[in-house]
Image: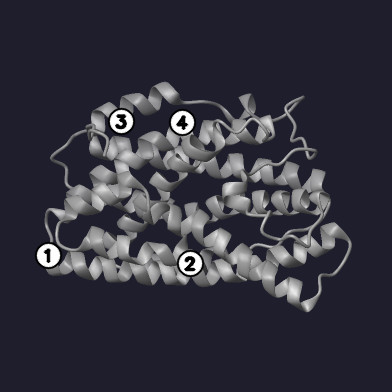
Amino acid sequence: MQQQHSYQDLLEASQRANWRIDDIIGGDKRLDFAKPFLPETFARTEALAFLSAEEKLKLNHVRSRGYLAMFELVEQFIVPFVSEQAAEGPEDDPHRAKALRQFVREENKHRELFRRFLAEFDEGFGVPCGLIGPAEEIAKAILAHDALAVAIAVLGIEWMSQAHYVESIEGDQTLDGQFKSLLKHHWQEEAQHAELDALMLTGMARSVAAADIEEAIDQYFDIGGFIDGGLKSQAELDLQAFERAAGRPLSAAERDAFVREQHQALRWTFLGSAMRNANFLAALDGLGGQARARVEQAAPVFC
C-alpha cells in the first residue's frame, strides 16, 4: 500500500490538481465513435463470437456509456456519506473537515462532468441506453448500512477507479482520446480521494471493536450483493440497447450468452477489480481480524 499522507497533504495536492470542466469538453473536443472507448478488459466483447466487429464496437460504446453513468450513480451515495463524515468526524485534525469538504466539491464536479459527457454521447450515439435506478433509491438502500461498511465500499470504489485508469486505460492507444481525457482528469482528483477514504476508514475503525469490523465486512458483502443484482439488470438493459443499435434481435441462445458474459464483465469492472486491488486489500489488512482474508476468498466469484 502507498504511504499514507495526512489530510493537509491531500488537501494541498487536491488544490494543485484542480481542473475546469470547460477545459475538457466542448468545441472541437468531441468523442470519436469510430474508436472504442473502454478497453477490452472491461468491455469483454470478444467472448461474443456471434457479433461482428462493427457490432462489438457498438457494444463497447453501450458499455462505455454505462461505465460513466454507473460512476455518476454511485456519487449519489458517496457525496452525502462523505458530507456527513465531514460534519460529524473527530476534530483532532484541523485539516480533516476541509479536506473532506474539498472531496465533496470535486465529486460534485465529477458528476457534472459525467452528465455533460453522457449528453454528448447520447447525441452522437443516437440510440437510447437504459440505466438501473432510480438512483435515489439505490443510494438510500446502500446508506441504510452501517457507516463503517459504507466506508469500506466507498474505498473499494475509489481504489478501483484508480487502477482502471493506470492499469488498463492509460497505455491503450486504440481508445478514443477524448474518452481517455475524461478518465485521466477524473483519475487525477480521485488519486486524493482514495487516500482520503483510507484515512477516513482508519479513523472510524479506531473506535470500534473487532466484532464490529467483522459485522462491517458482512454488511460490505450485503452491499456488494445488492450492487451485483443491479449489474445483472444492467446487463439486460445493455442487451436491449445493443439490439436497438445493431438493428437486429439476437436469438434466445445469443441473448442468454450476452447477458451471462456481460454480467460477469460488469461484475469484474465494478466489484471484482476492487476486491483484487492491492491498496484496498492493504487497507482491509489494517483493520485486523479476517477482513482481508474474507474479501480475498470471495473475490473469484466476481472476476
Query: Which amino acid, mark 1?
Result: Ala
Q: Residue at x 71, y 61 (%)?
A: 48
Residue 9 shows in this picture: yes
Q: Which badge, 2 or 4, is on the more N-terminal residue?
A: 4
Where does residue 115 sit, x and y in percent of width and height? 64, 45
Q: Which residue is mark 4?
A: 188
> Quick one: quadrant of the N terminus?
top left
Q: Residue at x 62, y 65 (%)?
A: 261
Element type at marker 1? helix
Q: Which mark is residue 10?
A: 3
Say which of marks 3 and 2 sits in front. 2
Query: Which amino acid, mark 2?
Result: Ile
Q: Nearer the viewer, residue 295 or 130?
A: 295
Q: Is residue 128 above or below residue 259?
A: above
Say which of marks 1 and 3 sits in front. 1
Query: Which amino acid, mark 3?
Result: Leu
Q: Which residue is mark 2?
A: 227
